[in-house]
Image (tube, coloured by chain):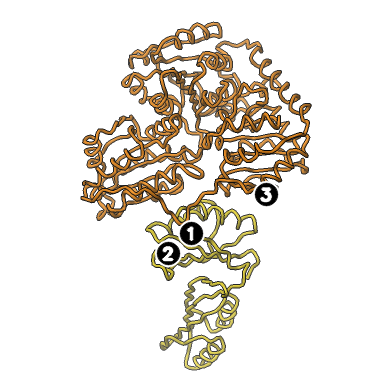
Chain colours: A orange, B yellow
Amino acid sequence: MKAAEVIVKCLQLEGVNTVYGYPGGAVLPLYEAMRKLEMNHILVRQEQSAAHMASGYGRVNNTVGVCLATSGPGATNLLTGLATAHMDSIPLIAITGQVNSKKIGTDMFQEADVVGSSESFTKHNYLVKNAKDLPRIIKEAFHIANTGRKGPVLIDIPKDIQDEEIEFSYPSEVDIRGYKPTISGHSKQITRIAEQINNSRQPILCIGGGINSSGCSKELVEFVEKTRMPVVCTLMGVDGFPNGNPYFAGLLGSHGYPFVNKAMNKADLIIVIGARFADRSTAVISHKNTSQHVIHIDIDPAEIGKNVKTHTPVVGDAGAILRQLNTYDYTSDISPWTDGIILERKRYMEENLNREWDAQGTNPCKLIKSISDKTGSKAVVTSDVGQNQIWTAHYFLADDSRRYFTSGGLGTMGYSLPAAIGARMAADNDTTVTAVMGEGGFQMLMGELALVRGHDLDIKVVIITNERLGMVRELQLNAYGNESYYGIDIGFNPDYMKLAEAYNIKGYLIEEDSQIDEVLKEAYGTNEPCLIQCRVNPDFPTLAHWRWR
Amino acid sequence: MNKDRHVLSITVENYAGTLSKVAGLFTRRGYNIDTLNVAETMDPNISRITVTVTGDEEVLEQITKQLNKLINVIKITDLTCKKSILRELMFLRISSTKETRSEIIQLADVFKGKTVDIAPKSITVEVTGDEDKNNAFIELMKPFGILEIVRTGLTAIERG
């Protein structure tokens, strides 16, 4: 059998039926094999999108998304998408074509050192030098991508290798000597944690994307209801815990709520589960409170103690450890502490939604709140990067069936639309899919709008426009004063309604708050895709309290 | 040896690109490699990479954890904190005249060095030892005029 066909067979045995890609000379044999073996191929408009789509697709399906690119520019375009997935620990398989193995290093047409350049953006990568290794490599790649701390794995396959004849047999087992992730938590550490919780008066639980990777929302809710402690989250953890749950406090960090950060500073016990505790999360935490005890639970030992001093480290899978923790009784009465934080959340949210905004344009927080109300019990909302990301993270009420996807770690503009396309292709018909973005991010990968119509995907594309790159503008304002805006003016915006028409998608324009409900009602009332432009005043702040404190 | 200096012995699966993954990790995470050497072990599928790095306990812990994350890394041993034997091989080409030649050879003998090449104006000596011994020998040779130094970097083994 042709090696190219072996590749496709292996993918099919891993349960892959859709791949996102862009063809080219170095993947010709692979595309011929996909045609023969009836693989569903989605032609993207730029390879970066292929990775974002595979990521959205895989996250909805709970599988490993697959993206494909040709050698050289195809592969280098893919890199930003891989780096995005790597930072957020999203499992992906990326297959790239490479020039003939005998010619590698001669600077052939469309040659690039993809294994070298993707080294720091992938969990692991392979350059296939012998066609016979392909089944083993593909088996290993899926295993590595989807176990332990998940992440993207790239397989670079020279064209001549794809053309070789080999015998097909797919291994059933994987044995990698240096790769054995720890799953269960150390039982002594678990007992210690249970004791620490019972001795604490002001505990706080901080969750990250690890909850979703492990798929343990149910176990988490049980744990929180047993311990009655407040839950705060990172950007990747927004949909890890039901946002409507009475113990939910909200987002922490530089773009989080002031009351959450205050609580993080006052807490006597911080339990971090499945979070990196990165700079955006810890920036606002002062280290003055030295009596704080930090418990860090993560599947990646390298994350523990990297950014924050940890007193009790536990390595393992979030779900497995929560199940272990749920076998203990928790007796400490912490209700005054928890109630205080939850009350502050309620007050803050109401104040900011109802605050009078006297300038022209809509209130984006109201827009997202209304989207949150209209999206139904099964939803995927993706957001881009910038102000729209923070507004969405705060006002879309997420949970494990109302997912929130965003580029949390790398902060990749352009992510929202392709991720929503992948999510839509994986989601069932009861699920609404909404892509929120600013005009900056939209225009980075707006070519993908063709797929929305081309595949008749019911996606509500929400573009929040303020003629500026809003978050950078705000950074300039805070750093250098209000005379210092530079390079953030969009300058020219296309007519989004005509653009929608050009793509044969219905367009809506929202210019003031009073139009929000009517437009959303119509948009979510059909199974048709649409593009909603919402005009927002450039002075509207990312976080309400930044302006109205 | 500086107390923050560590010799890490890393066994890896012998695939193409593994060394670049290990070395690349140091660059990426902002750690400096002082010395590095690589060779096969008794199992041809496994190579040993010996690196010397400088860093406090925290840095060393991060390096070790990050290295452990590399799929092809099998085991990392810190050979500084255990009883281990450290050695480095070094060639020194020293400027010499008829008058100084025998003195250099005598000094090399004291350091259990071998004279491996003699030319009209220079002499090449091979010395094996730990870093302190090798550095001492270099100091001793400086007055004669050192023309070139070639060092392999440390390699190490645990005591049995």
Query: What residue does disc 2 label?
Result: B46
- Taking A438 as reference, is B47 above or below it? below
Give the quadrant of the C terminus of chain A. Answer: top right
- Left or right? Give the position of A351 relative to B119: right
Local packing at callout 1 (Cα closer than 10 Å; few below 14, some 14-19, many 20+) is many
Q: Position of residue A111 (x, y in %)?
A: 30, 47
- Which amino acid, by three-letter code, is at mark 3? Lys
- Which amino acid, by three-letter code, is at mark 1? Ile
Residue at the location (52% across, 8% down)? A517
Query: What residue does disc 3 label?
Result: A188
* Residue A64 numbered mark, or none: none
Instruction: Say which of marks 3 and 2 sits in front.
Output: 3
Label 3 and label 2 in one chain = no
Q: Secondary structure at mark 3?
A: helix
Residue at the location (52% across, 65% down)? B9
* Residue B74 numbered mark, or none: 1
CA distance separating discs 1 and 3: 27 Å
CA distance separating discs 3 and 2: 35 Å
Asked if marks 1 and 2 touch (Cβ < 8 Å), the reply is yes
Q: Is residue A351 visible?
A: yes
Occupied quadrant, residue A202:
top right
Label 1 and label 3 in one chain = no
